Image: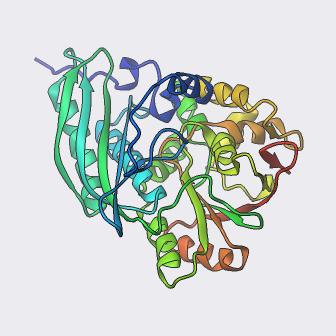
Amino acid sequence: MNRQPLPSLLSNCTSGGCGAKLGPGELADILAALEVKQDPALLVGFGGRDDAAIYRIDDERALVSTVDFFSPMVNDPFLFGKIAAANALSDIYAMGGKPLFALNLSCFPEKLERSILKDILAGGAVKVMEADTVIAGGHSIFDHEPKYGLAVTGIVDSRRILRNDTCKAGDALILTKPLGAGLIMAALRAGEADEAVVKTAADSMERLNRWAAEKMIAFNASGSYTYVHACTDVTGFGLAVHASEMAGGAYTLVIDGASLPVLPGAMGFAESFYATAAGQRNRNYMEGKADVSALAPALAEIVFDPQTSGGLLIAVEPEAAQELCDAIRKDDPAAAIIGEVVEREDVAVLIV
């Protein structure tokens, strides 16, 4: 008797990757209504919009804690595991931390073969080992759609924590990975993305931000002076929303659209009017907060496109920017200086 082919992961879920996240506006409304205990040791909580929580344990050290999981954006379960793990680990790197250990989180349909879950977990384990950390346990439940991710705990020098909204006027902006993954994954679901385009996007998504973060942290650890002022990772809210979070209420991030690194194929899909629901949620949220009027419609779509396991957006003093970008490019060749921070103008994000 011939064995039937394994069901497609994508056929068992309605959305995938960071594009499955709640919209930034909806999430802000929900969190604003929560009442929580105040703790002076909690240095970073969800009162802001940082990538992870930070809890002081002594005068020099703090724990960094995050959790991230989602449904698949690719059919290969091993690859899905690698991408999901890389994405979860990224929040630790964005805060200037080093991962200590991770816990698996998995939701899995009863109707699927258990070998699929085994491959997903194996993919995650590969990335956790690449991050030079360990899987210490986890939790799994049955669900109608497969989902996977990690809860990660890390350590950070409490004097060198990187927040997402502590940039300064004059800072240069570095983006370490190319954009457009959401559009490519949308085209994959529609059967329109060729293998080479999907592989390039997948290679980018599964790449750890460890290497860029280590170079960024080394700049700040080399002496008493701090060159890197702020950092965040660009994920489901897209470049525009994450940039607006970095701008806060005091600054405007001026981004050069021509300098943006974009994955091969993504612009063509945008020009062919591919779009994602998450991208539209990001666009709606940024109405009145971002000016993209100078851009061609396709590039504007890239700016709002939800990224899964995207790169780091780094605000660094201008005299150090090229040196840091060159160092990052040795391992992340798409890294680019994409703009600067200026005093507040009419909008939080201006793309020229």
Residue 349 is situated, as x and y percent measured from the top left of the image, at 77, 46
For the N terminus, the image quarter is: top left
| 246 relative position to 65: left or right | right
Note whether 221 is above or below 290 in the view shown. Answer: below
Residue 265 visible within the image:
no
| 270 relative position to 180: left or right | right
Total tally of numbered discs in the picture: 0
Q: Which residue is drawn at 45% across and 18% down?
A: 14
The type of colouring in the image is rainbow
Residue 254 is situated, as x and y percent measured from the top left of the image, at 80, 54
Note whether 165 is above or below 300 in the view shown. Answer: below
Q: In which quarter of the image is residue 157?
A: bottom left
| Residue lying at the far left of the rendered structure | 1
Residue 205 is situated, as x and y percent measured from the top left of the image, at 46, 48
Q: Tell which of 297 and 55 is nearer to you.
A: 55
Q: Which residue is drawn at 18% across and 23% down?
A: 113
Residue 94 visible within the image:
yes
Q: Which residue is drawn at 51% across and 85% down?
A: 223
Q: Which residue is drawn at 76% across and 51% down?
A: 250
| 257 relative position to 123: left or right | right
Residue 59 is situated, as x and y percent measured from the top left of the image, at 35, 68
| 44 relative position to 76: left or right | right
Note whether 143 is above or below 107 in the view shown. Answer: above
